[in-house]
Image (cartoon, coloured by chain):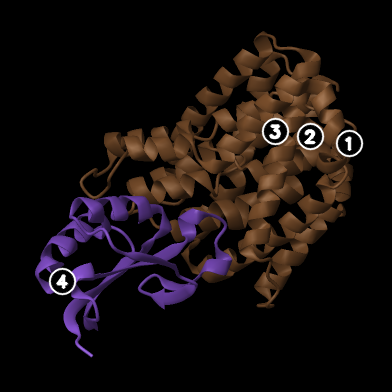
């Protein structure tokens, strides 16, 4: 417990969290502080490029083994199963209708790449590195949750008002820009290895923390504005779900990481991935596939509640548990 | 100067539906349109601003088509099939154009 509190205190006073808090508070106080959309887009491209490349270079150094394959399989399975659990929890805790519950559930099976990036940063600060291939696991966990939500609708809901999955939507999900850049950078990092990393290290390593701070300032602004404008849609049961579900998800991530035999850092990253909720890929898919679902509910929950929770308290908790359990 | 009657159709729709809408318009032989970004607004779902959105999914855009009056029904049928269940506004106004052969 002491370890969790110490890590949480250190994390809360780190620049990335304080910048996120600054953005969140500024938006909540209706400040006119904004990060231009093009700048935010450029920073997100930089972070995906950097995290993907570093992950690939790490795999090149350590080699490919069965843990990589097992982690990918476990990621896909978790991404498909977590929405089923989230759906059941939502129906019990919040009484959401089937369509909205399925849409929210999809977000909690998929992942938040920004939470993952922030997690790797916290791990680095703690002197703990996860397996480089966890970047690929993050990418693999994006889409199966969407299929799980559509299956839930087909099984329990009314499909007449929803469009479901078509080839175009599947293509958009699998080839969305974030995934292409993340996997592409990962592969280039894996091909070029340590030599490639050495050539661009000054660009992707040293400025990383600063860019992440500025990016999280923008994320704080977005989360604060979203929470302020949609606070009325969140009932107590939904709010509780936004905190409980990441904790539940992290337990499944912990189990998967332990079964595969990942390092303490790898287990922590698996917990972070399983605990995080999507607010980029899944909302886009839900607007097309389940237009009847209310975006205010799923976006506010994932971005306004779960994302800040994971960023401030969740990551230190997962890291401390992973360290304790693995002895790392 | 000689002007010709035409219809101006403005469709405000979620960004995610852009490709589906323009594809439907092309199939209805509507090959001319302009796509404009939408900065914000207010409607049945409350206030909305582009600045508060984290991804393209939260964005809106306006597709503007100017066509001959006799082609209006085909355009509206194609557009409605796409926008029917989604957030958005479809409006039609009378307008005049200088070069009728282009529409």
Mark 1 → mark 2, Cα distance in angstroms: 9 Å
Residue closest to the eye, B19 or A76: B19
Is label 3 on the same chain as label 4? Answer: no
**Marks 4 and 2: in contact by CB < 8 Å?**
no
Tag on residue A126?
A: 1
Mark 1 → mark 4, Cα distance in angstroms: 66 Å
User: Is residue A311 visible to the viewer in this orientation of the structure?
Assistant: yes
Is label 3 on the same chain as label 1? Answer: yes
Colour of chain B in the image:
purple
**Measured from the top left, where is residue A308 in percent x and y?**
68, 53
The quadrant the C terminus of chain A occupies is: top right
**Measured from the top left, where is residue A108 in percent x and y?**
53, 41
Residue closest to the eye, A180 or A223: A180
Q: Earlier in the sequence, mark 2 or mark 3?
A: 3
**Marks 2 and 1: in contact by CB < 8 Å?**
yes
- Residue A317 lies left or right of residue A254; in this view the side is right
Residue name at image x 22 percent, y 59 percent? B30
Is label 1 on the same chain as label 4? Answer: no
Q: Earlier in the sequence, mark 1 or mark 2?
A: 1
Residue of label 2: A319
Residue of label 4: B68
């Amino acid at each position: 417990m002491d370890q969790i509190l110490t890590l949480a205190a250190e994390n809360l006073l780190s620049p990335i969290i304080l910048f996120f808090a600054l953005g969140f508070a500024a938006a909540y106080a209706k400040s006119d502080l904004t990060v231009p959309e093009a700048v935010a887009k450029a920073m997100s491209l930089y972070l995906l490029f950097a995290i993907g490349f570093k992950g690939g270079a790490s795999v090149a150094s350590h080699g490919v083994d069965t843990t990589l394959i097992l982690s990918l399989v476990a990621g896909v399975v978790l991404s498909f199963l977590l929405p089923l659990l989230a759906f059941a929890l939502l129906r019990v805790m919040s009484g959401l209708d089937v369509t909205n519950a399925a849409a929210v559930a999809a977000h909690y099976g998929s992942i938040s790449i920004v939470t993952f990036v922030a997690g790797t940063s916290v791990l680095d600060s703690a002197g703990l590195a996860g397996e480089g291939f966890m970047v690929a696991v993050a990418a693999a966990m994006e889409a199966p949750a969407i299929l799980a939500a559509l299956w839930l609708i087909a099984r329990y809901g009314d499909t007449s008002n929803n469009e479901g999955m078509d080839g175009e939507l599947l293509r958009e999900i699998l080839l969305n820009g974030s995934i292409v850049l993340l996997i592409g950078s990962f592969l280039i990092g894996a091909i070029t290895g340590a030599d490639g990393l050495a050539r661009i290290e000054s660009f992707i390593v040293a400025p990383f923390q600063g860019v992440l701070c500025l990016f999280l300032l923008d994320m704080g602004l977005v989360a604060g504005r979203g929470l302020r404008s949609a606070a009325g849609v969140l009932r107590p049961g939904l709010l509780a779900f936004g905190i409980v579900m990441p904790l539940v998800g992290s337990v499944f991530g912990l189990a998967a990481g332990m079964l595969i035999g990942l390092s303490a850092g790898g287990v922590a990253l698996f917990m972070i991935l399983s605990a995080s909720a999507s607010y980029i890929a899944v909302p886009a898919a839900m607007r097309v596939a389940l237009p009847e679902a209310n975006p205010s509910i799923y976006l506010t929950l994932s971005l306004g509640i779960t994302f800040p929770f994971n960023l401030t308290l969740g990551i230190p908790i997962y890291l401390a548990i992973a360290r304790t359990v693995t002895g790392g | 100067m000689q002007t010709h009657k035409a219809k101006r159709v403005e469709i405000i729709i979620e960004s995610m539906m852009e490709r589906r809408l323009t594809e439907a318009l092309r199939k209805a032989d509507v090959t001319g349109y302009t796509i404009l970004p939408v900065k914000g607004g207010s409607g049945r779902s409350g206030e909305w601003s582009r600045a508060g959105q984290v991804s393209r999914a939260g964005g809106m855009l306006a597709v503007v088509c100017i066509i001959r009056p006799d082609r209006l029904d085909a355009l509206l049928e194609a557009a409605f099939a796409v926008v029917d269940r989604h957030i958005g506004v479809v409006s039609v106004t009378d307008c005049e154009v200088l070069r009728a052969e282009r529409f």
